[in-house]
Image (cartoon, rainbow, N blue to C red):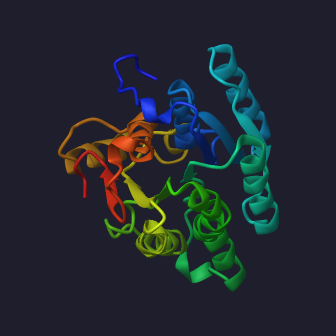
Amino acid sequence: MNPEDATYPSLRDRVVFVSGGATGIGASIVAHFAAQGARVAFVDIQAEPALELVERLTAAGHTRPHFVTCDLRDIAAYQAAIRQVGDAMGGIDVLVNNAAHDERHDWKSVTPEYWEDRMQVNLRHQFFAIQAAAPMMQERKRGSIINFGSISWHLKSGGMPAYTSAKAAVEGLTRSFARDLGADGIRVNCIIPGWIMTERQRTLWLTNEARQRTLDAQCLKEMLLPPDIARMVLWLASDDSRMCTAQNWVVDGGWW
């Protein structure tokens, strides 16, 4: 976290649950909440980078994050992990539905099984995480739920129709839950990231040509980094955004 970044006193000691927190955007979100003094729990299928992150943040003097290995496609195990965190930490104040996988695929080769797997990885777990965490928030009459969509379908990106379909649905999920949970003081918002330069994106997709096309399309001529998303997550989780709900928050450098 940059020492010049904003500090949110309302986040201190808040319990935050993050999915897909071991690497990339998720790891940045976990680190930023830890730096705010929040108590962070996260799940991921990748244990090694997750444990490295836990040790790094603990060594930096932050409250030790709680990590649970979990495959989000196993809904029973996932909801059990959320409830266990809530029981151990006194409830959940902030839920960040970050986990996703933008695997490319040819629509001609998609099978029903592959389609279902993409829905499980990119959409279904968000609903069932809310189902497990929201009752804890209802008890205290407050909470912030932050879902993750994608700029890809807004830009009419091809080559991954199951992914873009799932991410489009996240926006509908967000607005529906904002209505259902608003009476209990729970806010539900959706972040729409642009092309974020995680290690995975750099390794798999970034070329000089792709970088230049993106910069040409963006109003701001810098590639986006995971902390650019994490800072938006912090604001939406904090009391500073207390009257913001049912909205899409686009962080894309002015691309879309």
In this view, the residue farthest toward the front is: 140
Q: Pick out the residue farthest to the left.
A: 219
Residue lying at 55% horizontally and 26% vertically, measured from the top left: 37
Q: Name the image quarter holding residue 192.
A: bottom left
User: Up-down: is 110 above or below 51?
Assistant: below
Where is residue 100? Give x, y as percent. Answer: 58, 57
Judge whether 177 appears above or below 243 on screen: below
Quadrant of res 7: top left
Number of labels in the image equals 0
Q: Is residue 190 visible?
A: yes
Residue 99, given in percent of the width and then of the height, sits at 60, 54
Left/right of residue 63 with respect to residue 140 in the rendered view: right
Q: Is residue 39 left or right of residue 75?
A: left
| Residue 22 visible to an observer of this rendering | no
The structure residue drawn at horizontal position 71% and vertical position 47%, both measured from the top left corner, is 43
Decide which of 61, 73 is in the foreground and name it: 61
Image quarter in which the C terminus is found: bottom left
